[in-house]
Image (spheres, grey):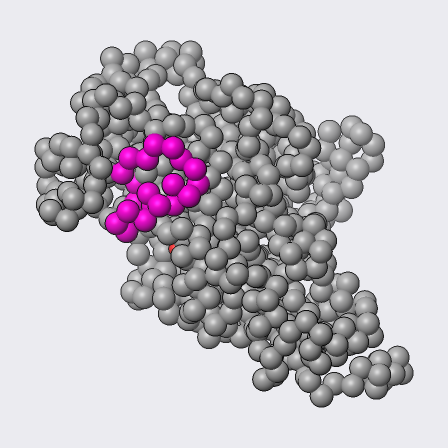
Amino acid sequence: MVLCIANGRRLRGGASLHGAYKYGLPFERSKIDTNHLIISVPSYSTKMSHPMFSPDFNFGVNTPPESPTKGHAPKRSFGSHVHKKSDSWGSLIDILEHGIPIPTSLNSGAFGAIEVPATRSPEAHVSQYMNALPAPPSAKERRLSRNSFGAALPIPRSKRQSRLSSVTFANVQDALSSVETDGAKTGVGSPRNILVSQVQDVYAEKVRAAKNMAFVFDIDGVLVHGDRLIPEGRKVLEMLNGNNQLGIKIPHIFLTNGSGKPEAARTEQLSRILHNPVSTDQFIQSHTPMRALAEYYKTVLVVGGEGYRCREVAEEYGFKDIVVPNDIVAWDPSIAPYRVFTEEERASSRPRDFTKVEIEAIMVFSDSRDYATDMQIIMDLLRSRKGRLGTVAADPVSERIPIYFSQGDILCPTEHPIPRMSQGAFRIGLEAMYKALMGVDLERVVYGKPELATYKYADEVMASWMENLHGEERVPENIYMVGDNPASDIVGGNMYGWNTCLVRTGVFQGGENDEENPANFGVFANVWEAVTTACKKQLGDDFKFTWDNRVNPVLHGRASAVE
Ligand code: G3P
Ligand code: MG
């Protein structure tokens, strides 16, 4: 049972917890015994009350995924986590009644994925945007009896699986050591490194604190705008890569809803723009955790992105048989009546007889470059018999193949002055069409921020990056998420128990804080302001944000002892 204490008073659990979640208030947990948990929400106001969660909902959001090193994954179906009350997000799903089991075609116990319960409703968001169409009563019955999907999102299980080839720099340590600080080139045993180690000996306490904090950076709107650098982004990365008082590398990873390129290509591009090394080992795109899905489906339709780049992504992830919309248009151009298909596109596509191919799942990896064609093909597949094009299922709802989206952002900041529509807008359009044609909501799975699976995966990457940097495979205690989008970066970080910093260089253009999803650590003009404020909190107000080669550790040690 959870006892909720807000402003010193005991409140109905559902009301106060919903308030805390909705307004992103800090809360503390303390366990009395195995059956009782106290949640304190000191800054809760009764105005925030809106009963929604059941009283035994708990916020134990930091429960790590099962250790990837503990041997083989147990045999289980996708939906097996849904009723696991010990996991708060699982409870949330129970409470929201979204526990629809996923069909399992798995027969191997040695399965390389962790299944994370979905925290977003598998139901379409479309009902709030259009008049609801009545579902035929028979559809309801069918729903109850059929297997569906949407209850769990697999993420890669093992550390090795999480790591994609790091080609940005052959050796991450060398790359990081190569960051020039104060004009000094460094290397193992260099005068700077000797000095760094002496300084770190003197400030052992600060060093411990620096290794116990980490940053998670959103990219678009925080560090860059498309291909354009946000200058504070470069400055921040130089500081975190060693240009600071301790000469220490303060851990940081990148967590973007961006997509559409292999990780190595995107990190190379970012390294160039940011003038700092960005390794694939510290980098997560929206579709990166979807790598785990390669173990579940053989033939998939991959949608979105420029040219054939998402086919490349899917190949790298290990998908065995990848179809893209161009392959289908090349096979039968009449499927997309408004498409002008060039000879070059025809020559580069891979047509075959798709009436004989069972496409098992649809993966929208990135933004569609041709809404009309992609939506038509997706709708055809969703209505088909077992994913065979040219067929229409007798019972299309119960036979429907699953559809996954790599992220849900509706808007994205770009070089254009007004944010552009993103994958979420495409999805909502598709949901509306599906409901209009089929009379029922489209169930789907959405990865990316703020989905829990993405944050759990970020923990895996963070622990592994910590091992790279400091030889300690663990997640630091004080994590700061810096983002520009309250509806993805901030709400997800708040839910996951991170400190959240909202910056004004991207999507958020509001007042003091975002009203729906306020950042719990504050709102900052830019990423430099956010990061330096967080560093001062963890490392002291006197912490310096440049490395000084002229520092004399002996004198500084004495001086600090006297101070
Ligand atoms: O919404 C699309 C994507 O470009 C957002 O990227 O880095 O802000 O999560 P990011
Ligand atoms: Mg952003």
Residue 473 appears at what percent x and percent y? 70, 50
Image point (47%, 30%), residue name: 295
Which quarter shows the N terminus? top right
Point 44% across, 33% down: residue: 294
Q: With 373 as the anchor, is 233 left or right in this view?
A: right
Check residue 529 for magenta coloring.
no
Residue 443: percent from left, percent from top: 38, 28
Q: Which residue is drawn at 66% across and 60% down?
A: 469
Residue 162's image quarter? top right
Q: Nearer the viewer, residue 496 or 211?
A: 211
Image quadrant of ligand 1? bottom left
Of residue 447 and residue 74, the one placed in the foreground of this image is 74
Q: Which residue lies furthest to the bottom in this view?
A: 550
Identify which residue is drawn at 64% across, 56% down: 468
Taking the image as shown, residue 304 lies to the left or right of residue 250, namely: left
Camera sees residue 264: yes
Q: Does the magenta stretch include residue 310?
A: yes
* Quadrant holding the C terminus: bottom right
Magenta stretch: give its range. Answer: 303-324
Above or below for 531 versus 194: above
Depth check: give the residue in front, 230 or 498: 230
Q: Is residue 222 left or right of residue 209?
A: left
